[in-house]
Amino acid sequence: MAGTQGEIIAARGLGFQYAGSASKALDDISIVIGQGEFVLLTGPSGCGKTTLCRCLNGLIPNFHPGEISGELLVDGVSVAAETTSELSRKVGYVFQNPENQLFALTVEKDVAFGPENLGLTREEIRGRVDWAMEAAGTVALKDLAPYELSGGQQQRVALAGVLAMKPSVIVLDEPTSFLDPRTAEEIMGAVDDLRRENGITVIVVEHRLDLVGRYAERIVVMDHGRIVADGKVEDVLDAEFDRLSGLGIGLPKVSLLWSLLKRDGLVSERLPTHVESAVKMLSQRLSN
Ligand SMILES: Nc1ncnc2c1ncn2[C@@H]1O[C@H](COP(=O)(O)OP(=O)(O)O)[C@@H](O)[C@H]1O
Ligand SMILES: [Mg+2]
C-alpha cells in the first residue's frame, strides 16, 4: 500500500475475553498494518473496536483483566513483553471519552505530562508541547482547565497529548462523536497531514464513513469480535455494500444514492466513496 515502509502492527489469532464476560470480545483477529497506513476501523456498536484499540496500547491486559490468546506485535515486539509506558511511546490512543484521559490543571500541563515522564531536556519538552498544541489546534486553549472545554476541544487536547509523545501509531476511537462535521473534518485533515509528513500510522475507529472515507486507504470491518472485511475503501464499499448497511454502518449518502441508481440499471460504475468521485463519474457520463 502507498506510503508503507514495513509492518508496525501484526496480530495473529488474537483473542480476548473480559473477566466475568460470557463471550469473547475479540475472536481470532489476524491483521497486519504497515507503517504510514491510514486505516478506518468500523463495525456495529459492541463488535470489539475499542477492545482491539486497548490491546494495541497495552490497556489490555494491564488494566482490563481477562483472558488473552494469540499474538500481537507492535513494531516487532510482543505487547505482552512491554510495559504500558513503553507502549505509550509507540501507540498513542485518544479515548472514545477523552475526559477520562485529561487530568492536569491546565491544557498545557496536560500535553506536557507525557513528555515530562520521558526524561527529556526542558527544550525538547517545550518543543514537543508547542508542536503538538499547534498541530492539534489547541494553542488558544493552553491555560484553560480540561473541565472547561467542550467535548471536541477535549478531543483535540487528548490528541495533542498523544502527539507530544511522538508515537509511531495514533489511534482515534470514535473521534467525531463529540465533533460537529467541520471540526471533525479539520481534525481528520490534521491527522492525515501528520501521517504524510511524519509517516505516522493512523487508525481511526468510526462508524460514519463519510467523514473518514476520504482519508483512509483501507477499511477494516468488524462484527462480533471478528474481522469480516478488510481492504481498500472503494473495493470493500463496492463489494460489501449491502452487508455494511445491514450492520448499521453509516455509509456515505453518495454511495447509497449510487447503489440505488445501480440497482435500477442507470449506472454501472463502482460505488463512489465521496462526492468528488461521484461528480467526476457523473460529468463523464453527462458529457458523453
Ligand atoms: N471493560 C469491560 N468489561 C467487560 N466487558 C466489556 C468491557 N468493555 C467492553 N466490553 C464488552 O466487550 C464487547 C466489545 O466491546 P467494545 O470493544 O467496547 O466494542 P465497540 O468499541 O466496537 O463498541 C462488548 O460486548 C462489550 O460489552
Ligand atoms: Mg468503542
Image (cartoon, grey):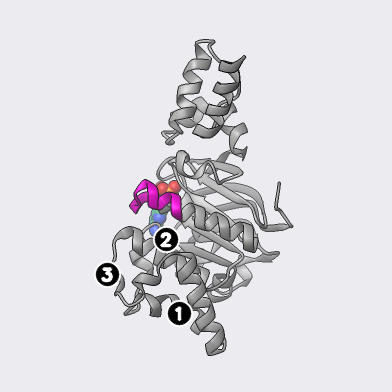
Is residue 174 in the magenta section? no
| SS state under label 1 | helix
Q: Nearer the viewer, residue 179 or 26?
A: 179
Q: Give the mark nearest the N terminus, 2 or 3.
A: 2
How many neighbours does mark 3 have within 10 angstroms: few (below 14), some (14-19), or many (20 or more)?
some
Residue 274, image x and y in percent? 51, 34
At x 49%, y 16%, the residue is: 261
The three-letter amino acid code for the residue at tag 2 is Phe
Identify the magenta region.
177-186
Q: Earlier in the sequence, mark 2 or mark 1?
A: 2
According to the picture, the residue beneath numbered tag 3 turns out to be 147
Disc 2: which residue: 95
Alpha carbon separation for disc pair 2 and 1: 18 Å
Query: Do residues under tags 2 and 1 come within 8 Å of each other at their CB atoms?
Result: no
Q: Residue at x 56, y 31 (%)?
A: 277
Question: Image height check: is 211 above or below 86?
Answer: above
- Seen in the picture, residue 104 relative to 28 is either above or below; the reply is below
Residue 94: x percent and y percent?
Answer: 45, 62
Residue 68 image offset from top left, x and y in percent: 55, 58
Image coords of residue 266 (percent x, y) = 53, 12
